[in-house]
Image (cartoon, helix red, strand yellow):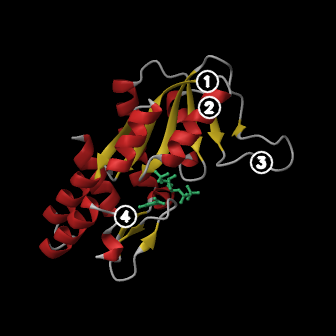
């Protein structure tokens, strides 16, 4: 099962760090006791192949019509590159803002108008970065089929952003699967599970409790 395999792989390379006593600050400003660093996948060639296998099988099942892969800067870029290579498809990447010199591009690579594009992100917290990237792809004339990431925190904020934007968000695995797998693998305790579930109920209010 894809969700479990992805969660196992993330845990096997120690991509997930718990630090409730010194919370992480996310790109959205949210404080969190957990951080998932999918950038580490780059450094593990055997596991990397398995992540690409999982991504490619997901894309073949859900987006067989895709014509271009668009990686989000920076963490989505290597994944988009590996997938595009495996599927023998063109790739572009989307900067978080337009470059301030040179060609001033927001999107790098050649994106032909009307092409069916799948946005590749490493992870969805609030969904803000990937939805912004999808909008830039459409501004440049691409037709976005959806946004696909390795992992989602399943936050209500992301669900709201998904509904409001109209872009569909897809992930190989979820926060619930990750916690379940970590508990089964004895990589977290019942107490840590409880804290992580409580945080997920109210991430924005968690620090003030
Ligand atoms: O769903 P969101 O709330 O937008 O958060 C998720 C984004 O945040 C992280 O990127 P970061 O801004 O840390 O930059 P990086 O990809 O360059 O490391 C992550 O790689 C996602 O792109
Ligand atoms: O939202 C983020 O910035 C974020 C969260 C996380 O767990 N991992 C990551 O790379 N970014």
Residue located at (41% from left, 53% from top): 125
Is 175 displayed left or right of 189 in the figure?
right
Q: Mark 2 points at which residue?
A: 137
Is 58 displayed left or right of 137 in the figure?
left
Q: Which residue lies furthest to the right in this view?
A: 102
Q: Callout 2 environment at 10 Å: few (<14), some (14 to 19), or many (20+)?
A: many
Q: Does the CB distance between marks 1 and 2 fall below 8 Å?
A: yes
Quote the CA–CA distance across marks 3 and 1.
20 Å
Q: Which of marks 3 and 4 is nearer the N terminus?
A: 3
Asked if the residue at label 1 sits under 8 Å from ligand 1, the reply is no
Q: Callout 3 environment at 10 Å: few (<14), some (14 to 19), or many (20+)?
A: few
Q: Name the residue under label 4.
A: 204
Quote the CA–CA distance across marks 2 and 3.
15 Å
Quarter of the image where the N terminus is located: top left
Quote the CA–CA distance across marks 3 and 4.
32 Å
Q: Name the residue under label 3.
A: 99
Judge by depth and name the residue closer to the eye, 67 or 198.
198
Residue 188 is drawn in which quadrant?
bottom left
Q: What element carries label 3?
A: loop
Judge by depth and name the residue closer to the eye, 67 or 35.
35
Q: Callout 1 environment at 10 Å: few (<14), some (14 to 19), or many (20+)?
A: many
Residue located at (24% from left, 59% from top): 201
Picture quarter with ligand 2: bottom left
Q: Does the CB distance between marks 3 and 4 fall below 8 Å?
A: no
């Amino acid at each position: 099962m894809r969700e479990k395999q992805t969660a196992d792989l993330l845990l096997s390379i120690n991509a997930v760090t718990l630090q409730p006593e010194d919370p992480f600050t996310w790109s959205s400003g949210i404080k969190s006791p957990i951080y998932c660093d999918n950038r580490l996948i780059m450094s593990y060639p055997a596991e990397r192949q398995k992540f690409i296998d999982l991504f490619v099988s997901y894309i073949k099942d859900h987006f067989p019509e895709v014509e271009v892969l668009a990686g989000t800067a920076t963490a989505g870029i290597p994944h988009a590159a590996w997938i595009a290579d495996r599927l023998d498809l063109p790739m572009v990447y989307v900067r978080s803002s337009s470059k301030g010199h040179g060609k001033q591009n927001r999107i790098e690579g050649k994106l032909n108008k009307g092409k069916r594009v799948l946005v590749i992100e490493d992870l969805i917290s609030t969904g803000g970065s990937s939805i912004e990237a999808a909008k830039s792809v459409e501004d440049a004339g691409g037709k976005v089929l959806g946004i696909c990431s390795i992992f989602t925190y399943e936050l209500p904020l992301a669900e709201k952003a998904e509904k409001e934007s109209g872009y569909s968000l897809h992930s190989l695995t979820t926060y619930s699967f990750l916690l379940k797998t970590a508990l089964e693998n004895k990589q977290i305790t019942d107490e840590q599970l409880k804290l992580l579930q409580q945080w997920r109920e109210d991430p924005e209010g968690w620090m003030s409790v």
